[in-house]
Image (spheres, rainbow, N blue to C red):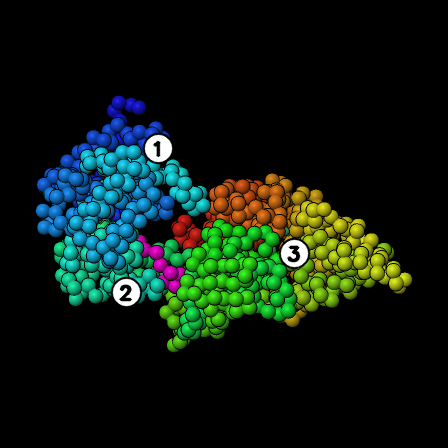
Amino acid sequence: MPVTEDRQKFVYDFTEGNKDLKDLLGGKGANLAEMTNLGLPVPPGFTITTEACKVYLEGGEEPLSMRDEVSAHLAALEERMGKKLGQADDPLLVSVRSGAKFSMPGMMDTVLNIGLSDASVAGLATQAGDERFAWDSYRRLIQMFGKTVLGVDGDLFEEALEEAKHTKGVSTDVELDAADLKRLVEGFKAIVAQETGRDFPQDPREQMDLAIRAVFDSWNGDRAKLYRRQERIPGDLGTAVNVCSMVFGNLGPDSGTGVAFTRDPASGHQGVYGDYLQNAQGEDVVAGIRNTMQLAELEQLDKASYDQLMQIMETLETHYRDLCDIEFTIERGKLWMLQTRVGKRTAGAAFRIATQLVDQGLIDEAEALQRVSGAQLAQLMFPRFDEKATTELLGRGIAASPGAAVGKAVFDSYTAVKWSRSGEKVILIRRETNPDDLDGMIASEGILTSRGGKTSHAAVVARGMGKTCVCGAEELEVDTKRRRMTAPGGVVVEEGDVVSIDGSTGKVYLGEVPVVPSPVVEYFEGRMHAGADDADELVQAVHRMMAYADRTRRLRVRANADNAEDASRARRFGAQGIGLCRTEHMFLGERREMVERLILADTEAERDEALGALLPLQKADFVELFEAMDGLPVTVRLLDPPLHEFLPDITELSVRVALAEARQEAHENELRLLQAVHKLHEQNPMLGLRGVRLGLVIPGLFAMQVRAIAEAAAQRLGSGGDPRAEIMIPLVGTVQELEIVREEAERVIADVEAATGTDLKLTLGTMIELPRAALTAGQIAEAAEFFSFGTNDLTQTVWGFSRDDVEASFFTAYLEKGIFGVSPFETIDRDGVGSLVRAAVQAGRATRPDLKLGVCGEHGGDPESVHFFHEVGLDYVSCSPFRIPVARLEAGRAAALNGTASDSR
Ligand code: ADP
Ligand code: MG
Ligand code: MG
């Protein structure tokens, strides 16, 4: 290290930091500094940086200069407060608080009252004129310190506290007097000695140093590590430590502690929202040890503090330009601010608050877009339970997969399948699910489990299937053997009883709660207008945010839609075309038989006949589709799936043939069919005869489809329409495949143009869904006018696993182990699949600068992925109709974030 370099600074006084130093000071420290600088009443203190933590974690030793810096800052603090840490006749006490850049469960809890000891407890009692208070503070210190710094099982202290209350015959801690608490302190000290083999440290500085070290160490606790892996928080950020002089809310009835929001986190409305607890310290207010009072009642209790708090909340909100949540304490009529941060809020409130802040002139449109998310919008679009309906709440679990589901309780998958086959709606209730429950989950309206978190099997699979799921409802006791579930109040739900579960809130109800469509969907559907009298604030807010997004975004948004009905809905939702029309869906039902004939054809004549029968049907499909999307591009993908998907199941067919043989009935056709099915049977159909390969080996198939598209377009032109068809070839791996199909297609199109006297302006392109296609994109672009990234198949082929097989088997384990933060089928894997996409975009554009680029995998509607597609410069994303608003919003957010608002549209 060069000698000239300034020595690194590891400790910052609250007066030295600010809110933008979260990397260095952590969220809590940065905001304490910000409030201090705003002149708000924050108890003085200092923050030890995340850099110090990093040095400690790397070398197992605090940086050399840190100890001196802490000493200097402590001395300054003591000077300012006029007393020394732990001073016997008048002790300065501090809290040691963890605070990383992101708030993280699993990190060390805060230790309050550091500096108290056998020597100073009496001094505190004299100074405060309250002996009970001093002993209560001391017992809290030993309890918190013992648990979080010395690693003693917290239950031991809780049990001792319970016993003290029991002996005295009282039910709350405030009823214990000084003598009781003094005895409790002795008991706590004995527990510490017993469990750790050493006495509770009496030296105040040693208490502080040990607590600081414990905060550093907690960064690498198991729960913290797991949380970081799952949330993709880098493991090397480290945590800061805040040392803050104590203020006391437990000094009697004119003291207390509280939490508050600057506006309602549920509705966004301005007002007084919070809870207050008299004569209490720290977490008491949220721990539910006594009933809290509403913040508004504080006005009667202590008007001066209340008025000051209201003013501070306004200052904070104007300063942070957002909803803030805060922690405060009142010590004998004096208000102290202990924490603030931009607060969490519900999805609906996020939209309302964003527009409210624009109206107040606090933020602009681009900023407003960053205050909401596509995930929140998606949440607002799910059907919901009618709030006005009253039904019994049975309990709550984790909101694992949104939606509102009602059905009869069943406790095993077999029953779920059986009942649903006979037309019943069921809710599958299990302790936890495993791959054997898959059938049952598919058959159910929703899934409820009493164990497991957001990455449990039930949660992951339900989200993948788009099914409502509430998991980890631990207060509900599930007894699968006796087929019943018991709620806390003793209510028993038997098999067949109706229950309702809300996957957006985690609530579980007894009986049927009526489901109403989301007003936001009513609005997108055009059944409710934002300006209408009955349109609520939420709809107006969504309407405005969508307008901001549409003005800002560069990406266009198209729909994956296979028929005119979906296309029309997509258009109402704002689709700017169809990015993927899958033609295989047009070959189901009665047309299946025609495909069967095509596959079975032995002669050219038979084949032509089969194709000839399909042609007018296909053409009619396209005419409808082009009409629904008149004036907008429609990408039609030629037939993609393995042919055997159109043929009967091999086992069923074998049985039929065998039976026919046994009965000596005629079965010529079935036998031929069985042979064909055998011939087409594949071990890995996903990697078999499908996509462009079909077009190359089944003569006339693609030609028929191209002809249907061309004739449909010509017909639309003839009736004054504006069809804009794009023909897409699936599963291309090499440019040669594409060239052959292209030549044939061009011949057919020229034919139709000549016959109808039209100029169809059809374009031809390909999906990029195989690694080889991405790797040779430069060559493929020679023969393609557009690329559409098929990121579902690309993900499967890049990772080498099939979605249908793995999501239910090992994905849960992968998510739990933190190998995935989220399924790569849900959010594009930027590093792997994403880098192939990026390279293919560059290579493709290098060959053909005006190459049109889009994506039609499910990632097209995923918020995170939309940002990625914006960054790599695609022209559009395509997704299911229902996801279109989400994609529009996220495309706007991505553009606003990168400051590249569109002027090209
Ligand atoms: P968390 O991150 O869990 O909120 P905090 O560090 O904010 O932890 O502290 C836990 C509780 O202790 C909070 O209620 C906080 O307001 C309170 N607290 C922290 N420091 C002090 C202090 N110096 N004086 C009084 N109360 C404090
Ligand atoms: Mg806090
Ligand atoms: Mg595909």
> Which mark, by number, is residue 57?
1
Query: Position of 591 compared to 669: left or right?
Result: left
* Picture disc at residue 270: 2
Label 3 packing within 10 angstroms: few (<14), some (14-19), many (20+): many
- Hey, what amino acid is under mark 3? Arg
Residue 579 left/right relative to 314 = right
Q: Circle 3 — which element? A: strand
- Neighbour tally class for label 2: few under 14, some 14-19, many 20 plus, Cα within 10 Å: some
- Kindly report the distance in space between the C-alpha atoms of the residues bearing marks 2 and 3: 52 Å
**Callout 1: helix, strand or loop?**
helix
- Which stretch is magenta? 342-349
Q: Nearer the viewer, mark 1 or mark 3?
A: 1
Decide which of tag 1 and tag 3 comes sooner along the chain: 1
Cα–Cα span, label 1 and label 3: 55 Å
Residue ID for mark 3: 637
Q: Number of numbered discs present?
A: 3
